[in-house]
Image (cartoon, grey):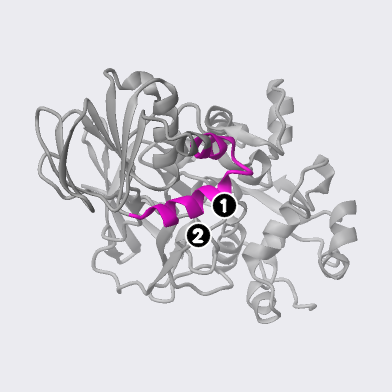
Amino acid sequence: MSAEHHTVIIVGGGPAGLPLAVVLGGWHPFFRNSRMFAARYAPLAGYLQQFDRTLLGLDMRHLVQSGIKPVDLFRTLHHPRQLFEELDQVAMDFRCGEPLDALLISREPVGGLWNRAPQNLLTLSPGQWMEFAFYPLAQHAAEIGHSLDVNALILKTDLIEYYHRVPERFGVAERIRTFEEVERIEPHVRGFQLTSRHVQTGTEQRYTCKYLVLATGQRGRLRSLGVEGEDWPFVTSHYDKPADFPGERVMVVGGGRSGDWAATELHDAGKQVYYAMRQGPAVHWRLIGYSRHGLPYYQRMAAILESRSPRLNTLYHTHVTQIAEDGRVGLQTPEGDQVVEVDHVIKEIGGTADYSILQGLAPLTLTPMRDNYRFQVDQVQIHAHNYESIDVPNLYIGGYLAAGIGLVVIAMHGTTYAIAGDILQKEGRLSPSPSLV
């Protein structure tokens, strides 16, 4: 089988991979001295206004040595303050130029796991934190005639509509292949060889590339309970809406944000919910306490639990031991073994970053990253100025998988510009700007 070659291949079409396809597709950032940015970051504004070329040509290595991380620089240019007031506050102007030969491969439509988020889900952050700097959410809303408060939590449906519009809006749709699962990435004389399989037809495809960007996110591989009966048809890892679960009794296995959302929405739809989790009540209530004053559904969850609703049975320090074909679920609890009869089991136990697709390459140096909100990912050690793996040359790590990126939504696409700039400089498309700091 002959392989299709590209200079760059991006694996993953979520909020880390998608903006990189646009920037490598020719949309480069230039400094614009916005009123708000200049007022808040005068020294940085004074430095950047000396450049009349694209910011992708900045000497990122020198900036890091001066104490400025690329992710922090571009996040600040994009969000000089956390609240959005006007389009002109973004201290970057994007201009379309010559594209680089880049291809994005995704196992789902662009937008990543947001495609599979529950139908009615509110995001955890203001909508404009989820946007790309080259396409502010307020601009998108104006273009489609949609009234949207970009400082409020955004519905999944509005967010995914925004992401889905990006490829055509910026002329990169032909550079994106969706519904392809990358199964292997191996060394090749031209750099890397990728083997993918179409998720619908099963057709195998091979690619080679000089530069590879891994932006598959922290849920590349879903976790398993590892118990007998986990594959019965009434057991699922995907929750969308209560109407998908006929019957009265549903067990949610989890304990994080996804499980909390499913348990709350199912309860309010009239279901009898058994909520099983390995953690104890103190850990669970810590998450609720962090969130109940900012997220409406956590206010609701707290109210349900504090009212001791009989339709939400929380099972702490509990392990699922078996799932029978007739819907009986075996549990190991502090009070002893129990059996609960249900119509459905929903596994909201998260996933892990999947580095197993990298075969025959040097092992990656990984660093566990955890936060107070049960976000867990093993991040790849990278060079701080370009997010290139310290172990594998020309392998770049996008988004949350890059060590030091921070597990906050406002930073998830911050690796875009340093990666694009480094590749373009290596390809001789840009020469690094002189270091003026």
Real-space Cα distance between discs 1 and 2?
A: 9 Å
Residue located 35% across and 48% down the image: 350
Relative image position of residue 139 (x, y in whole percent)? 73, 33
Q: Are the two marked residues, 1 and 2, in contact with CB atoms closer than 8 angstroms?
A: yes
Q: Quadrant of the C terminus?
A: bottom right
Q: Is residue 7 left or right of residue 62?
A: left
Which residue lies most toward the bottom here?
65
Element under disc 2: loop
Figure quadrant of residue 186: bottom left
Residue 22 pos. (x, y %): 58, 45
Q: Main secondary structure of the magenta part?
A: helix
Residue 357 is tagged as none
> Which of the pair 117/115 is nearer the observer?
117
Task: Say few, some or many: other residues with alpha carbon within 10 Å of mark 2 (under 14 / 14 to 19 / 20 or more).
Answer: few
Q: Is residue 231 visible?
A: no
Callout 1 environment at 10 Å: few (<14), some (14 to 19), or many (20+)?
Answer: few
Q: Is residue 157 left or right of residue 276?
A: right
Q: Residue 217, image x and y in percent? A: 42, 52
Residue 418 visible in the displayed image: yes
Q: Position of residue 158 (x, y in %)?
A: 58, 28
User: Residue 13 vs residue 247: left or right?
Assistant: right
What residue type is disc 2 on? Answer: Asn
Q: Which mark is residue 372?
A: 2
The residue lying toward the viewer, choosing from 432 and 340, is 340
Mark drawn on residue 290: 1
Q: Is residue 166 left or right of residue 89?
A: left
Which stretch appears magenta?
A: 279-302
Look at the image and say whether residue 54 sits in the magenta stretch. Answer: no
Mark 1 or 2, nearer chain start: 1
